[in-house]
Amino acid sequence: MSDHNFSLFHHTYPGKSESKGRPPLLLLLHGYGANEDDLYSLAPYLDERFFIVSARAPVTLRGMGGGYAWFNLGFTPQGISVDPAEVEAARQRLHKFIGEIVEAYDLDPNAVYLLGFSQGAMMSLAVALTNPGLASAVVAMSGRLMAQTIDQIPDKDALFGLPVFVAHGTRDTVLPIAHGRETSRNLSELPIDLTYREYEMGHELSAESLEDITDWLRQQLDRASSGTLIN
């Protein structure tokens, strides 16, 4: 667990790799209404080479039974609304937190991997795309790419080759599949290495999608360790 010296409360799972050098970081970002325990349960199934950190979002939701969010959602007759300033504050805080944990746990600053679900997926994409070179790879599950993020990309060419895995459920009623497909279309306009997959599931992580994601992350680590370029 964390202490007051960090920007975000979090759990850590050091892994069991005995390789020399500083380990790669895999940062887990939960969705709206969840907490750091949610994705932390995935840690034993992920590659042992990762030093895993599962972060708690900064916004406490009232009446959610201990749930948290990266930013508030406004429910209006016109649909869901967000405060762009609050989204930006969360993005900056998360960026700062990554620097803190890399230094505190002596992790490899050139091997930062992000994995987010729903609102956490939005934040994973936001941090990675607006800070080219920060992330080695991104997994975005059941989320979407915010227009605010697209507008904030400082240099699209600097994102060349960034591996991004997007997973979405065809039966998702929280963020319908149209969001996943729109995210895929928008990301396809960037010079990244995009993998987009749909699954017969709702707003969740299925056994099939988890297997694909763990395999994909393992491949990214293998390529990085061997020095193989991703085309």
Image: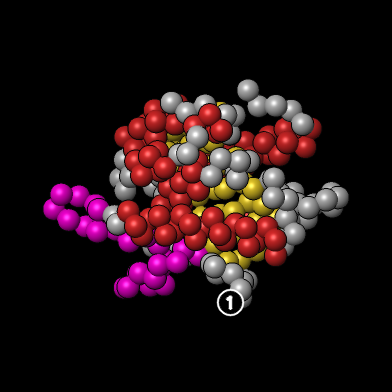
Percent across and percent down for residue 6 are 59, 69
Side of 154 where 175 appears, left or right: left
Amino acid beneath label 1: His
Side of 145 where 97 appears, left or right: right
State whether residue 138 is above or below residue 123. above
Residue occupying image coordinates x 86% and y 50%? 20
Side of 49 where 213 appears, left or right: left
- The image quarter in which residue 68 lies: bottom left
Residue occupying image coordinates x 61% and y 66%? 11
Tell me which secondary structure the magenta stretch mostly adopts: loop
- The image quarter in which residue 230 lies: top right
Residue occupying image coordinates x 57% and y 48%? 114
Side of 37 where 26 appears, left or right: right
Can residue 22 be seen here? The reply is yes
Residue 63 drawn in magenta: yes
Which residues are drawn in magenta? 56-81
- The extreme bottom residue here reads 4
Percent across and percent down for residue 198 are 44, 33
Percent across and percent down for residue 199 are 44, 35
- Identify the element where label 1 is drawn: loop
- The extreme left residue here reads 77
Quadrant placement of the N terminus: bottom right
Q: Which residue is mark 1?
A: 4
Residue occupying image coordinates x 62% and y 58%? 99
Can residue 208 be seen here? The reply is no
State whether residue 96 is above or below residue 146. below
